[in-house]
């Protein structure tokens, strides 16, 4: 199990937080905590890759830095 925090650009409100949460739910990470500007994600590296998580956040319309 890996726990990683991602810094996210472009998030300004709770709508942004919900958009990222929805994308992370779709890829079925084990757990996550999303705040404006960041997401702490816990996932099984045998099922999901770091790239998958970054792609999900970008699908929500934001940039991982």
Image (spheres, grey):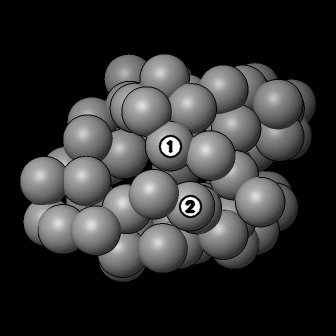
Q: Is residue 29 above or below residue 4?
A: above
Would residue 32 be seen by someone viewing this image from the given angle?
A: no
Could you tell me if the residues under marks 1 and 2 are in contact, i.e. CB atoms within 8 Å? yes
Mark 1 closeness class: few <14, some 14–19, many ≥20 residues within 10 Å: some
Task: Name the residue rendered at 31%, 47% in the picture.
Answer: 21
Task: Name the residue rendered at 14%, 66% in the picture.
Answer: 14
- Residue annotated with mark 2: 9
- State left or right for residue 21 relative to residue 59: left
- Front-lying residue, 48 or 14: 14
- Secondary structure type for disc 2: strand
Which mark is first along the chain, 2 or 1?
2
- State left or right for residue 35 relative to residue 57: left
**Which picture quadrant has residue 35?**
bottom left
**Where does the image place residue 54, in percent across and percent down from the top left?**
70, 38
- Front-lying residue, 57 or 44: 57
- Secondary structure type for disc 1: loop
Q: Is residue 56 above or below residue 8?
A: above
- Residue annotated with mark 1: 62
Would residue 64 be seen by someone viewing this image from the given angle?
A: yes
């Amino acid at each position: 199990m890996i726990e990683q925090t991602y810094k996210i650009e472009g998030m300004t409100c709770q709508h942004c937080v919900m958009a990222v949460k929805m994308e992370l739910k779709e890829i079925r990470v084990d757990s996550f905590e999303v705040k404006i500007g960041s997401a702490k994600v816990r996932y099984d590296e045998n099922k999901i890759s770091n790239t998958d998580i970054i792609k999900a956040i970008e699908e929500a319309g934001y940039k991982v830095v």
